[in-house]
Structure formats: structure tokens, C-alpha cells
Amino acid sequence: MHFTFLCLDDFPVAALSMAIDPLRVANEISGQRNLNWTVVSESGAATFSSSRLSVNPDEALANVAQTDAIIVFAGASARLQNRKATGGLLRRHLSHGARIGAVSGALFALAEEQFFDGYKCSAHFCYTAALQEKFDKLLLSDTLYTVDRNRMSFAGTAAIFEFMLGVIAQKVSESVAVETACWFQYAGLRDTDTRQILPTYSKNHTRDGLPRAVRSAIDLFASNIESKLKIEDVSKQVGMSLRQLERSFKKETGISPGTYYRKLRLDAARQKLLYTDKPLQEVALSVGYDSTSAFSVNYRREFGQSPTQARKDRSHGVRHAALSFGAPRLPQRSLSNWHMPSSEAYVPKALPHGAVHD
């Protein structure tokens, strides 16, 4: 099986490494070369990652004659440099049976060229609000990764790594996939239905580790970014009194539910300011602010700069939103009529006792 890894500007070097290294290790363990890859750029010239490390590609995309899959790595602000030529090459490979994939921020570049219109796709929580705002034909999911027909999407580094373990299981063997995971001290594997792990304000928990009522309240907040809920109504929906919910939030996150809700809305606003060109007034309305001035005051208080300055900064290299809480929770979509293609069969979840996360 052959993969082509296309690197655009600001690509995440860790994700590229974790796409390549499991394939390399699997070949070494098996003593065969069943898994192959080529690293390319649009022109064949070196490309800089988001950490400013550069990669010297093997060749230009135009020189790739045949491949099983092209997976694109890019920052959220990157776009195809030659839209007509590169877009045409990608479509040609699709017509010849290849699959096209987007890792994290690369979804912006491919969605701009309509490659994912009408397809289910996994989006990293740092980008979901902006993607929802910018591309209304994407069927976004908060799962780790998605394979929908000949399109693949990965929410980040761990997602592409786990996908590659599944490829190894199918193309080499399950035992080699398990041993590869152990080489990286990786404790457990997750399938495509696994939802992303989301951060929270608490230093001690991810969102999944919070008590059920607090987690349910956060999900309600995240699903109602534009139309604000009353905290008292939320407390009733999660089966607590307002006072109990206030106490529980303070204990688990250090802040009140109202403050948490406001931060979620401002995080979503920051994504839209950085990754879309929506007017400031529209951004404010989309996160529940009727007044642009009130929105600006709260945004400056949260992030230390005005919304206008935040938008200016993105043109000076500040391209990645450092979000405190993550994006709004996406509505759950049933995947009951969709399954992972047989060529990417999933490996067993249980790994040998003692394997731990790096």
C-alpha cells in the first residue's frame, strides 16, 4: 500500500511523523516493505511546519503517478498555492481510485476546494466553530477520525496514528499492529466512533472526567452558543438546583457555570475571528451578543486584546487559537449506516498489560 503525504504551509510536524513512523516500524517488525510512502509538496520545494521546522519533500505532487491515498497536512490558514493545478491533480487521483484525506487544519484548504461537500468529516475541536461558520456543506463530527467513501479526515496527531495502526492490522497483521503500538508505548486503541477528548478549565480533569451533571451542563452550553440559555433552566435539565450546580461547577472548574458558558462563547468567537472573514457584528451575534461593544469588552477581558486586534494579528503569524475550552459540541449524527471500509479494518482495542501512554 502506498501513501502520499502532501505538506502545505504550517503543517503539523508531529502529525506527519505519526503518520510515517508507525508504517516504518511495522515494516521493520515484519521485515517486509508492505507499507510505503512519499512526502510531497505542491511544487517540490521545502515546506515549513507550524513549528518552523522544514521538510524537504521527495518530489512535487505532479510527479506522483499512482497512489492509494493522498493525505494532506496543513495549518488552518494554509490554502493550495496553485488551486487549479493542485485541485486538478487531486481530482485526477480520486478518479483513479485513490482516497483523499485531511489532517486537522488541512480540512480548511480542502473544504475551500469543495472536496468534502456532503461528506462526514472529523474536525479538531479548535476549528469546529470556524468550519461550521465557513463551510455549511460539511457534515462535521466530533469523533477522532472519519472515513466516508473515498474521503478521510483526522482530528489530529493521535487520530492519524490510530488510523495507521488499523491499516497495519489489515495490510500486515494484527500482531504487528499491536507490537507497533507497544513500540510507541501506546496504551489503547479507539475506533472511528470515539469522540475527541476535550479540555476544561479544571487542571485536574478533561471534560470526560467531570461529574455527569457538570458534563451535561457543559454539553448544553456548547450546543447553545448563539441562543443563550438561562443557567437556572440548565440546572433543572441536569437534575440539580441552581445552588447545587453553582457549587459543583466551582468545585470542579474553579468558576461559575455562567462564567464557563461565557468563556465557551468567546472561544467560539475567537475561532471565527481567526479563521473566517465574517464581519465583527455577525461574529458577535453568532455567539449570543446583541451588542458589538459588549462583545468587544468581554473579548478584551478574556484574551487581552480587542476582536479587531485579534483579526489583525492573524496576518502577522498568529494563526492558531489558544483555546481554553474547545469548540461547541456538535450534534450527534448516527453512523449506523456507515462502517469502516474493509481495507482499514480496526485492530483489537486491548493491548498487552503494561503498555502505557508516552
Image: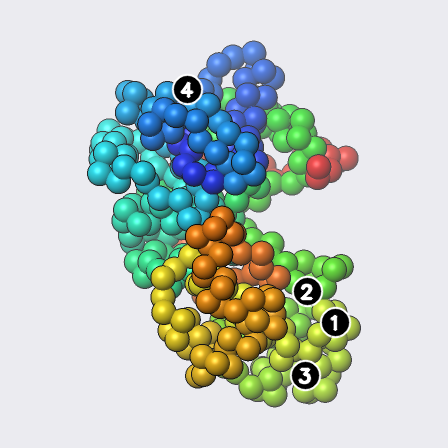
Q: Disc 4 versus disc 2: distance between alpha carbons? A: 43 Å
Q: Disc 2 versus disc 3: distance between alpha carbons? A: 21 Å
Q: Which residue does the image show at 65% across and 62% down from the upper left?
A: 200
Residue 254, position in %: x, y? 74, 71
Q: Which residue does the image show at 47% across and 38% down from the upper left?
A: 11
Element assignment for label 2: loop
> Does the rendering let one see residue 321?
yes
Looking at the image, do the residues carrying marks 1 and 2 touch, with CB atoms under 8 Å apart?
A: yes
The C terminus: image quadrant: top right
How would you rate the neighbour count of disc 3 (Cα within 10 Å): few for under 14, some for 14-19, many for 20 or more?
some
Q: Which mark is residue 201?
A: 2
What amino acid is labelled 2 in the image? Tyr
Of the two numbered discs 1 and 3 on the same chain, state the one appearing first in sequence: 3
Looking at the image, do the residues carrying marks 1 and 3 touch, with CB atoms under 8 Å apart?
A: no
Q: From the viewer's perspective, is the residue at label 1 or at label 3 nearer?
A: 1
What amino acid is labelled 3 in the image? Met
**What residue does disc 4 label?**
58
**What residue does disc 3 label?**
240
- Residue nearer the viewer, 242 or 191: 242
- Above/below status of 102 relative to 175: below
Element assignment for label 3: loop
Q: From the viewer's perspective, is the residue at label 2 or at label 3 nearer?
A: 2
Of the two numbered discs 4 and 3 on the same chain, state the one appearing first in sequence: 4
